[in-house]
Image: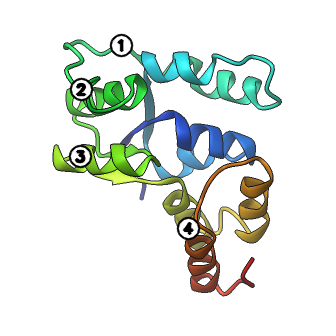
Amino acid sequence: MKNGLVIADAGPIFSLAIIDKLELLNHIFDEVKIPKAVWEEITLDTSTEFYKRIELFFKSRIVNIKGFNELTFVMDYGESESVILYRELNADFLLIDDKKARKIAENFGVTCGVTLGILSTAKDKGLIKELKPVFKAFLKHDRYYSIKLLNVLLERHNEQKI
């Protein structure tokens, strides 16, 4: 069983694109959408090695928010539009890694998920074989996750720590 509609923010998109695992979103959720502000953010640099993956995966999943973005004073543009789109579409999850933005979203009653949670679920479902190579790729590409947290997840999944 899949987990309904997810709205994705830029951070998790970049992380999943770097490891070439955007398709995990299709395996875990029924539907994936992004607001236009996130699209603008994730397609800003067309020179990255993973740009094409992002463009192909998200080009048909962009949704314009209907309401006024009243959250830009507390969150960045993409994060704030993600929260608004979550509300407008009555989504099931918001995929957002930024801790401050996630706390703000949760204060608005938004159910949030993070990239590491997606990867842990994917490992549980047998969609990925090992987490350690994925985590090493994050570190190599300057995706900032706590080593302590990565090791907790590796231990939970009976893998050797970093």
Q: Position of residue 24 (x, y in %)?
A: 60, 49
Q: Earlier in the sequence, mark 2 or mark 4?
A: 2
Circle 2 sits on which residue? 71
Using the numbered discs, state the Cα–Cα distance from disc 3 to disc 1 in whole angstroms: 19 Å
Secondary structure found at label 3: loop
Vertical comparison of 11 with 3: above or below: above
- Which amino acid does the dot numbered 2 rest on? Leu
Mark 1 touches mark 4? (CB < 8 Å): no
Of tags 3 and 2, the one toward the viewer is: 2
- Which amino acid does the dot numbered 1 rest on? Asn
At label 1, counting other C-alpha atoms closer than 10 Å, the crowd grade (few under 14, some 14-19, many 20 or more) is few
Q: Which mark is residue 120?
A: 4
Q: Earlier in the sequence, mark 1 or mark 4?
A: 1
Q: Earlier in the sequence, mark 3 or mark 2?
A: 2
Tell me what residue is drawn at x 43 percent, y 45 percent: 96
Q: Earlier in the sequence, mark 2 or mark 1?
A: 1
Q: Which mark is residue 64?
A: 1
Q: Tell me if residue 147 can be seen.
A: yes
- Which amino acid does the dot numbered 4 rest on? Ser
Q: Position of residue 48 (x, y in %)?
A: 79, 26
- The residue lying toward the viewer, choosing from 121 and 149, is 149
Using the numbered discs, state the Cα–Cα distance from disc 1 to disc 4 in whole angstroms: 30 Å
Q: Position of residue 152 (x, y in %)?
A: 56, 80
Q: Residue furthest left?
A: 108
Of tags 2 and 4, the one toward the viewer is: 2
Q: Earlier in the sequence, mark 4 or mark 3?
A: 3
Circle 3 sits on which residue? 110
